[in-house]
Image (tube, rainbow, N blue to C red):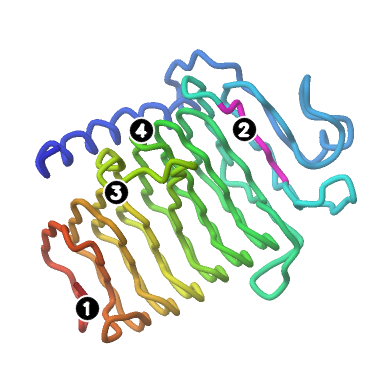
């Protein structure tokens, strides 16, 4: 895939995903709509959801919070999970609209419990409009077969990574207007599932990541850590992360444009952005930082 074709493909995905994200604003969505509130936890919020945490579903649909959700720890929920939506098939589709509410755990950056506050596994996933915080493990764990869109979401003060993403070999991930801050291991981490065959690096050329108009601040580790794929960072802010602002391993293409970065740790030579792949292709435009790149 050429760099230009990758940009076009990413833009097309973003337009499609944005249409999905507007489902709660009037656009037609074929999937059912489910509402989740603290008051329905004790009995189960909808058919198939057992009483207590986590709220669990295995069907495609639009899931909407109608109030804040605060985890109540229980022996039956050892992973301290609040929401677990996992249809788990490539053709499935999940939209989780927080509707300006928060999902709140019982841990935090100094208190480890376990697991993920939110677990999502579907072909197409959208997470939007709210906050996920104070998880004793990861804030949000995602397995996306085809696409992931995270927009207008704050993921903060979790013990491990704020957002941990597993994807297949041709998935596209987009973060827009997101805040990943003050998480223990780091802000965002991608981990490609290679499987027992240990696929070669060139098998992941169709993985794409777009980060734009987002903030990655005060995480103890990396702001962004991506194992492999093509990456576009546009108009983001990185500050005070313990590791590099962004660390790319086997990146096929990387574009940096309009980003600001300062006071982030990293190597080599404490560079703000690090791209390690020997076959990297990089484009730069109007970034503001001192010692920007370690290549």
Residue 48, image quadrant: top right
- Which residue of the protein is positioned furthest toward the bottom in this rendering? 269
Q: Secondary structure at mark 4?
A: helix
Q: Secondary structure at mark 2?
A: strand
Q: Secondary structure at mark 3?
A: helix
Tag shown at residue 18: 4
Between label 1 and label 3, give the one nearer the viewer.
Answer: 3
Mark 1 or mark 4, earlier in chain: 4
Give the CA distance from mark 3 to mark 4: 30 Å
Q: Which residues are magenta?
A: 82-88
Give the CA distance from mark 2 to mark 3: 38 Å
The residue nearer to you, when weighing 267 against 52, is: 267
Q: Secondary structure at mark 1?
A: loop
Look at mark 3 in the image and give the residue it sits on.
201
Look at mark 2 in the image and give the residue it sits on.
64
Residue 204 vertical placement versus 163 (above, below): above
Mark 3 or mark 4, earlier in chain: 4
Picture coordinates of residue 122, whole percent (x, y)? 52, 30
Query: Label 1: few (<14), some or many (≥20) within 10 Å?
Result: some
Between label 3 and label 4, give the one nearer the viewer.
Answer: 3
Mark 2 or mark 1, earlier in chain: 2
Tag shown at residue 289: 1
Q: Residue at x 58, y 41 (%)?
A: 98
Report whether 168 appears left or right of 69: left
Picture coordinates of residue 218, whole percent (x, y)? 47, 75
Residue 61 vertical placement versus 285 (above, below): above
């Amino acid at each position: 895939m050429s760099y230009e074709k990758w940009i076009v493909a990413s833009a097309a995905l973003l337009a499609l995903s944005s249409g999905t994200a507007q489902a709660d604003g009037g656009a037609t969505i074929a999937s059912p709509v489910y509402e989740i509130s603290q008051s329905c936890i004790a009995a189960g919020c909808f058919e198939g959801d057992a009483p207590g945490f986590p709220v669990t579903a295995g069907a495609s649909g639009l899931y909407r919070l109608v109030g804040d959700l605060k985890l109540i720890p229980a022996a039956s929920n050892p992973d301290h999970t609040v929401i677990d939506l996992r249809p788990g098939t490539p053709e499935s589709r999940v939209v989780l609209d927080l509707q300006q509410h928060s999902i709140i755990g019982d841990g935090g950056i100094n208190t480890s419990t376990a697991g993920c506050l939110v677990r999502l596994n579907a072909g197409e996933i959208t997470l939007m409009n709210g906050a996920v915080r104070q998880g004793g493990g990861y804030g949000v764990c995602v397995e996306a077969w085809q696409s992931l869109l995270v927009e207008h979401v704050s993921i903060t003060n979790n013990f491990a990574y704020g957002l941990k993403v597993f994807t297949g070999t041709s998935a596209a991930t987009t973060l827009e207007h997101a805040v990943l801050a003050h998480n223990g291991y780091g802000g965002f981490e991608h981990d490609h599932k290679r499987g027992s065959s240990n696929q070669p690096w060139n098998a992941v050329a169709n993985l794409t990541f777009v980060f734009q108009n987002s903030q990655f601040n005060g995480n103890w580790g990396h702001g962004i850590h991506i194992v492999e794929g093509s990456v576009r960072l546009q108009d983001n802010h990185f500050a005070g992360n313990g590791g590099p602002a962004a660390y790319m391993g086997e990146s096929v293409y990387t574009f940096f444009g309009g980003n600001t970065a300062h006071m982030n740790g990293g190597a080599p030579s404490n560079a703000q952005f690090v791209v390690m792949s020997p076959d990297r292709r990089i484009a730069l435009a109007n970034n503001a930082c001192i010692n920007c790149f370690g290549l």
